[in-house]
Image: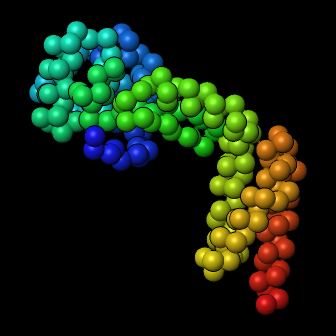
Amino acid sequence: MTPRLPIFLDLAGLKCLVVGAAAEGKGELLRRCGAEVVATAAAPAELAHFALVFAAGLPRDAAIALAVACRACGVPVNVADEPELCSFYMPALVERGPVTVAISTGGTSPALAAALRRRLDHALPRHLGSLAALLGALRPAVRYAIADPAARCAFWRSVLVGPAARLALAGQPRAAAAALQAALAAAADRRGAA
């Protein structure tokens, strides 16, 4: 099997087609990503207007025809439980705010991907998304305060094992933000004194 490229797509404002009643769950995921979801059948000539196509629960001949038509016009297609018809696979997801962990078995075993998702869901801290949001909010200030990329990487590594991260993961966002601001101020003072 040829390896697949794992990517995260920006679908905001793009049209995506969801075909078959069993594909409704994908429609909800697409809406959360900002996509415009069309859930009615489309003629082959219309397929080129879609960024992605999902199908589930179609008769085999209809699924094959849809996959062939999508490939002919260069539109990525996913046909549930038919990996040989897919040009992309949907991973199992673990989400914590802006942090998304995607698990794929390349279409070989969705059950294994789901089992791994459950294990990771239990293993990852519940407030991991809060930590990511806090770090993301401070990125511009850190870039401004610490111009040297190596020093900036060292700063982030220290933050991830320091009090700000521990507080954020413990569900104390205000205390975490204060600790992160203090760490940045201390780092900026050290740079200024050097």
Residue drawn at 18 percent across, 30 percent down: 70
- Residue 112 visible within the image: yes
Task: Specify whether 150 is left or right of 42.
Answer: right
How many callouts does the rendering have? Answer: 0
Task: Specify whether 150 is left or right of 33.
Answer: right
Q: Horizontal and vertical percent for residue 10?
A: 42, 44
Residue drawn at 64 percent across, 65 percent down: 140
The quarter holding residue 105 reads top left
Q: Horizontal and vertical percent for residue 2?
A: 27, 44
Color style of the picture: rainbow
Answer above or below: position of 110 versus 177: above
Q: From this viewpoint, which residue is outermost toward the bottom?
A: 194
Residue drawn at 13 percent across, 24 percent down: 44
The quarter holding residue 61 reads top left
Q: Horizontal and vertical percent for residue 77?
A: 27, 30
Task: Specify whether 32 is left or right of 40.
Answer: right
Taking depth in this image into account, of 89 and 54 the one nearest to the observer is 89
Answer above or below: position of 163 versus 168: below
The quarter holding residue 81 reads top left
Q: Horizontal and vertical percent for residue 188?
A: 78, 77
Quarter holding the C terminus is bottom right
Taking depth in this image into account, of 135 and 66 the one nearest to the observer is 66
Answer above or below: position of 135 versus 42: below
- Residue 18 visible within the image: no
Taking depth in this image into account, of 192 and 85 the one nearest to the observer is 85
Quarter holding the N terminus is top left
Taking depth in this image into account, of 60 and 126 the one nearest to the observer is 60
Residue drawn at 38 percent across, 12 percent down: 22
